[in-house]
Amino acid sequence: MSLLAAWYDLRSLANPLRELYDWLAGHASDEVVYVVSALIGSGGILVFVGLGALVNVWLERRIIGRIQVRRGPNRVGPFGLLQPVADAIKLIQKEVLQPRASDSRLFGLPPILVFIPAMLSFAVLAWAPDMVYADLNVGVLYLLALSSVTALAIFMAGWSSNNKYALLGAMRVIAMAISYEIPLVLALLGPVLFTGSMSIAAIVEWQQAHNVWLAFLLPLPVLIYAVAATAELNRTPADIAEAESEIIAGFHTEYSGMKFGLFYAVELVNALAVAGVMASLFFGGWWLFGVDDYVPPWIIFIAKVYFFYLGLIWLRGTLPRFRIDQLMAFAWKLLIPLALVNLVVVATEVLLWKELELSNWALAVFAVVNLVLAVVLFAAFLRLLTAHLYRLPRRARLVSEVSVPALAAPGTTPS
């Protein structure tokens, strides 16, 4: 039914849902099937994101604890599994304070507004061949637009607090977000150029049809997107708004209780969304070289999401926090020039592939060329960026005779 084209098709789920779909299709109108499919799809996303946020709190604290040679949460429940529940109850019970001089009408909106783009981003991700909540033909553009909305909520939080430190923290985060948005957009143009579509589902299907992950064809955009998205998440090593030695907690300094809890939770949800975009656009989404014929595709997709999410945890527990000048220089002096050069290369390759009507063997050539070019370009630009940091010793010089002036004997006066 065309009415269901952009909603969850329940036939991709378990047998009970398939039977429910068939029964509804035979006993109800298209509008009823449309609404029921939408409610089940949105409910499934909410359950995944809600439970994922709780589980991810435990995962991050346990894994980072192991990285830093400590135990992590281990008191509340077996292996500390109930610690996220205890933390949530504690945040709900805490008093929500609001500065007297703050803007009362705007102060309560940012914790809610910042959560909306994070939730909406899961709507265009392809969980399985027929499991896309909203299969938009501008899915990539939709994700970029949602990421831009977050900057408004962050600035609103800093400004409405009427706190100079919160305002400075918000401006620093927005400056970083805008700077890294440019290479991120340029990196995502690579998959769009190769596939000729901005639909997330279509990009996954292109990778299945050509039996290749776009990560093999576009290694440099993968690296650029990974770095830029990590900075956009405002997580370590790029959490410049929360540098304890600089401007305390940044834009959410004045928030307490569950309002602060929402800011903390949205960081975990955004991390899952970034991992989902990485898995979909560069690593085949629900497709895994035929394994999806035996394993449910949505399980493969979730496994890929958590694989990249564990990579974000690894970075958080390993790298130190960067300074604002280091982050800005890395974006403007390294990532943006690399992204521009890569865009020209990818556009040239796609033009040759389409105009000369080359077969799929050209993809293997492009993969090798792009890999070599990525290594050479990244090393060259990194060398230029850090040239002033190298302090090489001077060339050793051999001296055969050393003239040392004689010293006067103790108790005598030098002549």
Image (cartoon, rainbow, N blue to C red):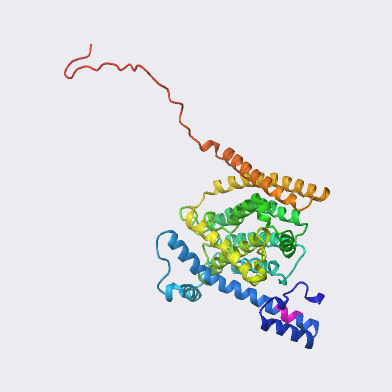
Q: Nearer the viewer, residue 277 or 120?
A: 277
- Which one is nearer the viewer's eye here, 35 or 212? 212
**Residue reaching furthest to the left:** 411
Provide the major secondary structure of the magenta segment: helix
- The answer to whether residue 364 of the structure is visible from this angle is yes
Left or right, 138 with reference to 59 = right
Q: Which residues are magenta?
A: 34-38
Residue 295 place in picture, x, y as percent = 63, 71
The residue positioned 46% from the left and 75% from the top of the image is 82
Q: Quadrant of residue 101?
A: bottom right
Judge whether 60 appears above or below 94 on screen: above
Answer above or below: position of 18 versus 143. Answer: below
Against 233, residue 94 (above or below) is below
The residue drawn where x is 45% and y is 31% is 393
Residue found at x 63% / y 42%: 377
Q: Is residue 43 left or right of residue 66?
A: right
Q: Quadrant of the C terminus?
A: top left
Q: Is residue 95 left or right of residue 275?
A: left
Q: From the viewer's perspective, is residue 225 above or below residue 276?
A: above
Quarter of the image with the N terminus is bottom right
> Does residue 333 appear in this view?
no
Q: Quadrant of residue 212?
A: bottom right
Q: In the image, residue 343 lies at what x, y percent? A: 72, 47
Q: Position of residue 179 (x, y in %)?
A: 63, 50
Quick check: is 37 in the magenta stretch? Answer: yes
Q: Residue 128's quadrant in the figure?
A: bottom right
State the residue at coordinates (75%, 57%). Answer: 195
